[in-house]
Image (cartoon, rainbow, N blue to C red):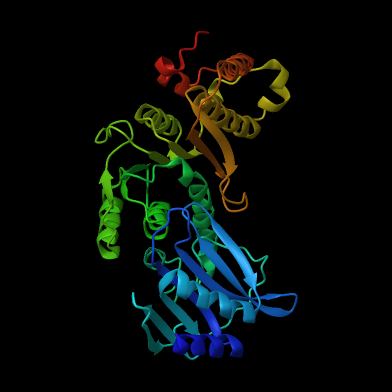
Amino acid sequence: MENLQALIADQIGAGTMTQATLNNVRKKDPTGFSKVDIKPVRLKEELHYQFSYYYSQKVQHENLTPEEAQSAILRLFEETFKQGLLHTQDADYQILISKKFKVSILKKQATRTKVELTHNRKKQYLLEEGTPIPFLVELGVMTPEGKVVAKRYDKFRQINRFLEMIEDVVPHLSQERTLNIVDFGCGKSYLTFALYHYLKEIRGLNLNVIGLDLKEDVIAHCNTLCARFGYEQLRFLVGDIAEYNDLEHVDMVVTLHACDTATDAALEKAVRWGADVILSVPCCQHELFSQVANETLSPMLSHGIIKERFSALATDSVRAHLLDLVGYKTQILEFIDMEHTPKNLLIRAVKSKSTAAEREKLVQSYREFKQFLQIEPYLEKALADRLGLVF
């Protein structure tokens, strides 16, 4: 290990290490971390190294001085990892350690020569800039060197925001079997590819992901990209929400910008599949616009644009409430900043159990809300047999 110790001491001592990744654990432990990323950061005007420990359901960070970092890296190689990659200003070093602790160090041309002393309050993205990601390069969000294209930075932020929401629901998904995931109305599939990349390539889950859309040319292009990226457990099909019946059970349903009651059709499908997780970004919520009526609200509802926005919010509120009534715990979250698109709400629902008293309270509040606005929502009628409500 002396050659490894000398390498680490030289690079950290000189401040020339730009990034490092330690992986390939010696003994798999479901409760332990599977990877450690290391990068230089500036804290209170002094050089430190941030260690990011990747567990199955979380990432923990630790900031160490250069001296502490040297000891920590050596300890991690001695106790946990068989492989590592050190990026420095002068070269990349591939580190391989055999079962008998024989160390091999392969020196390669430097690929990350710039030391970026990021402050610890800088936004940490799940997909980091500086690391080329094939589907983001192909879709024009990144350059081949991993730099985010300036005019596509909003898309980059949107993708990472979406993955943060995915990260939160991973604990609600089975870790023991292949997960069936269906994305209705996938379109050009920025987020479908991102979901697959994160769950498969980063989290290491077994997946069967289906993207569904009505546009044949878009589906053909997406399947071509799947083959190019080697995404063997992701495929795209031409079809519509209501008629897709190829799976008996789906673990997660994603529906992004399905128009008007197509969102409700997808939510109904997800409920009948018994999906553990539902993620829905509604679009064009017109259904209740012609129904909403209340004299007390007439100062607001008499203005078309205000009534349209109110009806959209009421529609999504009803959807969330009905999902709660059929056995989910639902949140309505901000998807991306309002300045980027007005369609910035995401309904996130995970399987949950409620007491009889909690359900009765939900029924009562829904009944009062429905009567107050004089509405008959599509989703209520679609799920009538599951709701068992009498009005």
The percent coordinates of residue 175 (x first, y second) are 38, 46
The percent coordinates of residue 116 (x first, y second) are 60, 79
Examine the rendered structure and indicate whether residue 204 appears above or below residue 36.
above
Residue at 70%, 21% (x, y): give it.
298
In screen coordinates, is 94 left or right of 300? left
Q: Residue furthest front?
A: 100
In screen coordinates, is 2 left or right of 116? left
Number of marks drawn: 0
Which sits in the foreground, 344 or 328?
328
Examine the rendered structure and indicate whether residue 148 appears above or below residue 183.
below
Examine the rendered structure and indicate whether residue 266 appears above or below residue 214.
above
Which sits in the foreground, 385 or 379?
385
In screen coordinates, is 73 left or right of 239? right
The percent coordinates of residue 130 (x first, y second) are 49, 73
Which sits in the foreground, 128 or 21?
21
Quarter of the view holding residue 13: bottom right
Examine the rendered structure and indicate whether residue 361 appears above or below residue 26.
above
Residue at 46%, 85% (x, y): give it.
4
Q: Residue furthest top?
A: 391
Q: Residue furthest right?
A: 44
The percent coordinates of residue 249 (x first, y second) are 31, 34
The quadrant the N terminus occupies is: bottom left
Asked if one can make out residue 369 in the rendered structure from this viewpoint, the answer is yes
In screen coordinates, is 197 left or right of 330? left
Residue at 67%, 71% (x, y): give it.
119
Asked if one can make out residue 131 in the rendered structure from this viewpoint, the answer is no
